[in-house]
Image (cartoon, grey):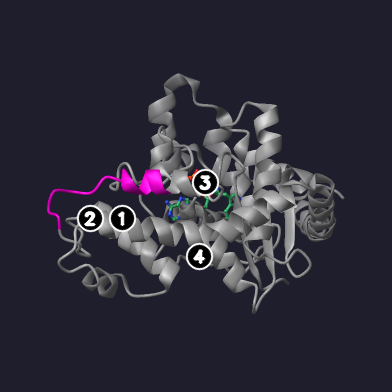
Amino acid sequence: MNNGFLSGIQPSNLLHIGNYFGAIKQFVDFQNDREGIIMIADLHALTTTKNPATLRKNILSLAATYLAAGLDSEKNILFQQSAVPQHAEMNWIFSTLMRMSELERMTQYKDKAIVQGENVNVGLFTYPLMMAGDILLYSPLTIPVGEDQKQHVELTRDIATRFNKSYGDTFVVPGVQITEVGARIMGLDDPTKKMSKSAASEKNYIALTDEPDVIRKKVMSAVTDDIGVVNYADSQPGVKNMLDILSLIKDRDPGDLALDYEGKGYGDFKKDVAEALVEFLSPIRAKILAYLDNEEELKKILENGAERARVIAEEKMIQVKNAVGLIV
Ligand code: ADP
Ligand code: TRP
């Protein structure tokens, strides 16, 4: 049994500081005392990305970002979901176990279905089943994800429990881990919604590869309020969000940081936030670009990870097939 952590990110667009603080940073911290299985969820990304060249670029870029953030590819298993066929296979088995109504309740699906109407693809509907397979194939104890993925991990727990009840103990029921601060970085152009790589405007997010001047422009135009005082308060979501960002970079309490700006306006505050981000992201950006310069090496790292993942996934799949009565 594996007692490490497992997580994944879809290579669906540029990664931003929300992904970094809400997900990647945690993986890096975790690797000190346990082994991680970290995937590039490219099969999931197919539900929204229809451009092959973009998908290829995003897969490599996510691999480069994981490594640039400090993930050790020897200690952890870092791989592409599509390189391990058991993920898609498990998806089918789970689809025969779960009810339509259970998937219809998933908020991420409901949100997407509202926007896409009749065009919503079947993959978006069954997406949580694939995610359950991603997790249960590897028996991890914890799944570090942000708030928005919590419901999918809870469904995974239900699937594991139901499978075990129907067919005998096969899966370890995993826990869910969410960071305290930084679990939810909000959009700079609309601080009432989370920062997202699929946001309509580029002003919504700070990408990890944004150049210093782009970062400065985005922060200076971030939406605040007309109160004009830097407080850490829910009534000032834009300011609060930037204090959270600053707090994550400086490793200081956001309420304390607000006190540094007594008697100062938003201009000074935003300048500090921008400079802190520039300083923090510059080395990460440089490393991402350096990894991207050596595509062959990146592919080798991913293939090595996939080989290690396949060994675990193949063994679990045999147990599952035996449990349900498929002769192996
Ligand atoms: P996006 O919404 O930008 O497309 P994903 O849904 O692919 O991002 O999320 C990848 C990981 O990053 C997940 O673990 C998710 O919870 C985390 N994450 C995404 N956006 C944020 C955010 N704004 N703040 C904190 N964590 C986030
Ligand atoms: N669905 C997750 C997201 O969009 C990505 C993901 C795919 C994942 N498989 C996973 C996360 C397994 C944790 C565990 O963020």
Mark 1 and mark 4: span between their CA atoms?
Answer: 34 Å
Q: Secondary structure at mark 4?
A: loop
**Badges 1 and 2: C-beta atoms under 8 Å apart?**
yes
Q: What quarter of the picture does the N terminus occupy?
A: bottom right
Mark 1 and mark 2: span between their CA atoms?
Answer: 6 Å
Res. 8 visible in picture: yes
**Badges 1 and 3: C-beta atoms under 8 Å apart?**
no
Name the spot of residue 91 as percent of width and height, x first.
66, 43
The amino acid beneath tag 1 is Lys
The vertical placement of 32 against 122, above or below, is: below
Mark 1 and mark 3: span between their CA atoms?
Answer: 17 Å
Indicate yes or no whether the magenta region holds residue 39: no
Ranked by sequence position, the earlier of labels 2 and 4 is 4
Mark 2 and mark 4: span between their CA atoms?
Answer: 37 Å
From the image, tell me which residue sits under label 2: 266
Indicate yes or no whether the magenta region holds residue 220: yes
Q: How many marks?
A: 4
Q: Nearer the viewer, mark 3 or mark 4?
A: 3
Furthest residue toward right: 328
Mark 3 and mark 4: span between their CA atoms?
Answer: 31 Å
The amino acid beneath tag 2 is Tyr
Q: Indicate left or right for 238 with 306 as reference.
A: left
Q: Nearer the viewer, mark 1 or mark 4?
A: 1
From the image, tell me which residue sits under label 1: 270
Ranked by sequence position, the earlier of labels 3 and 4 is 4
Q: Indicate left or right for 87 with 22 as reference.
A: right
The amino acid beneath tag 4 is Val
**In this picture, which residue range is highlighted in magenta?**
216-228
The vertical placement of 294 against 264, above or below, is: above
Name the residue nearer the viewer: 146 or 210.
210
